[in-house]
């Protein structure tokens, strides 16, 4: 309470909405098994909830993830996203704005349970001349502070996408380093992809299973190509921002590079035979804040993939190694991860 009294009014309002938002979710939880057993439950919802129960069992039995009571309940929030994250960066820099919180440490976003509140905060940042991006989030992990429920925001996803989401969020409860978003998200993504590979292959050599494996691999390849495309423009933008030219010239050159990025995506989409999962991302405004959201989740995935291979794909051993990495000093950890990436690329 004393620490709350020492923060600014803005911070106090932020923490208040965060507490209220989380408690609102907790109060609306319904046990999934009870919903499955209830004849009044919608048939389509029951099918999805049964799939969740299968995924939970698989995550615990086959992936050694700390399932506990997570994803054993369901909440209908009656809205499309659970939170809206606000990202910001200077107009002529790719250096992210950071916000620091208890437990989570310093992160590159600020989350709101209300879209209006998120947009209001974003508007204030824009008035300061910053590039701002507001993105809806369908799910997140409370890092063990609460038993995470399944939300209506994700329940209608395809089976393998539901599995990927649950594997990713549970991974955050294995290892989480406050203030190290790149490490945390890359690790969780690596677990997600390995878990997904095992999940879709669990049916053996059936044609249906083979198709799911092929589709999952293909979508992951597209995702990696999307990330590579966006990141390929970072050096050009960083170089531009350092040039000794007028602000007007910088703005025009920046806009030209963004247009060029959109053009490259159109070419990439043709190569993907019309796969359009990223149309929405390119259709809305692209700025420094939005570009920064792409880098976080993938940069260190090759390092974690190499680490998993080094322990013969034993996930318990892999988690133990990642825990050891998390205890290293920042410089030493960065060097060790870079070494793993080099091995992966050989």
Image (cartoon, rainbow, N blue to C red):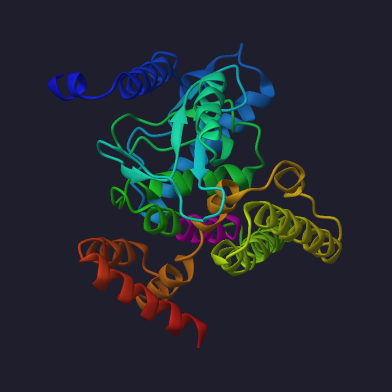
Q: Residue furthest bottom?
A: 346
Residue 60, image x, y percentages:
38, 48
Residue 8, image x, y percentages:
28, 23
Q: Main secondary structure of the magenta part?
A: helix
Whether residue 192 appears in magenta in the rendering, the answer is: yes
Q: Name the residue at 40% across, 31% down.
A: 148
Tell me if I can see residue 82 in this picture. no
Residue 233, image x, y percentages:
64, 65
Whether residue 24 appears in magenta in the rendering, the answer is: no
How many numbered discs sit on the rendered protein?
0
Residue 97 drawn above or below residue 345:
above
Q: Name the residue at 46% across, 54% down.
A: 95
Residue 144 drawn above or below residue 233:
above
Please identify the quarter of the rendering in which residue 260 is found: bottom right
Q: From the viewer's perspective, is 220 left or right of 107?
A: right
Task: Compare residues 76 and 179 and report the one nearer the observer.
Answer: 179
- Residue range of the region highlighted in magenta in the rendering: 189-201
Q: Name the residue at 67% across, 47% down.
A: 286
Tell me if I can see residue 244 in this picture. yes
Task: Compare residues 211 and 339 and report the one nearer the observer.
Answer: 339
Residue 6, image x, y percentages:
18, 23
Task: Compare residues 155 and 187 and report the one nearer the observer.
Answer: 187
Q: Name the residue at 52% across, 44% down.
A: 165
Residue 64 drawn above or below residue 25:
below
Q: From the viewer's perspective, is 95 left or right of 46?
A: left
Q: Which image quarter holds the N terminus?
A: top left
């Amino acid at each position: 309470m004393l620490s709350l009294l020492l923060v600014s009014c803005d911070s106090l309002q932020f923490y208040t909405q965060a507490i209220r938002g989380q408690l609102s979710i907790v109060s609306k939880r319904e046990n999934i098994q009870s919903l499955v057993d209830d004849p009044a439950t919608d048939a389509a919802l029951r099918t999805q909830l049964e799939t969740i129960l299968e995924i939970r069992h698989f995550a615990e039995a086959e992936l050694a993830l700390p399932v506990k009571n997570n994803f054993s309940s369901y909440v209908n929030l009656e809205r499309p996203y659970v939170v809206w994250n606000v990202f910001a960066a200077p107009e002529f820099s790719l250096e992210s704005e950071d916000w620091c919180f208890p437990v989570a440490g310093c992160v590159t976003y600020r989350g709101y349970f209300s879209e209006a509140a998120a947009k209001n905060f974003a508007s204030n940042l824009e008035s300061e001349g910053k590039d701002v991006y507001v993105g809806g989030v369908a799910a997140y992990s409370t890092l063990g502070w609460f038993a995470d429920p399944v939300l209506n925001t994700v329940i209608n996803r395809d089976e393998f996408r539901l599995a990927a989401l649950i594997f990713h969020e549970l991974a955050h409860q294995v290892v989480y380093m406050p203030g190290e978003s790149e490490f945390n998200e890359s690790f969780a993504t690596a677990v997600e992809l390995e878990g997904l590979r095992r999940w879709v292959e669990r049916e053996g050599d059936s044609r249906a299973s083979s198709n799911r494996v092929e589709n999952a691999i293909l979508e992951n390849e597209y995702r990696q190509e999307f990330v590579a495309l966006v990141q390929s423009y970072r050096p050009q933008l960083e170089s531009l921002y350092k040039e000794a030219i007028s602000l007007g010239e910088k703005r025009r050159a920046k806009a030209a590079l963004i247009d060029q990025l959109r053009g490259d995506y159109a070419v990439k989409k043709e190569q993907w035979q019309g796969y359009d999962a990223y149309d929405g991302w390119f259709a809305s405004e692209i700025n420094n804040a939005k570009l920064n959201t792409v880098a976080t989740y993938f940069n260190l995935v090759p390092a974690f993939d190499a680490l998993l291979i080094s322990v013969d794909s034993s996930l318990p051993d892999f988690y133990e190694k990642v825990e050891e990495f998390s205890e290293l000093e920042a410089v030493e950890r960065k060097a060790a991860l870079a070494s793993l990436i080099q091995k992966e690329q050989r």
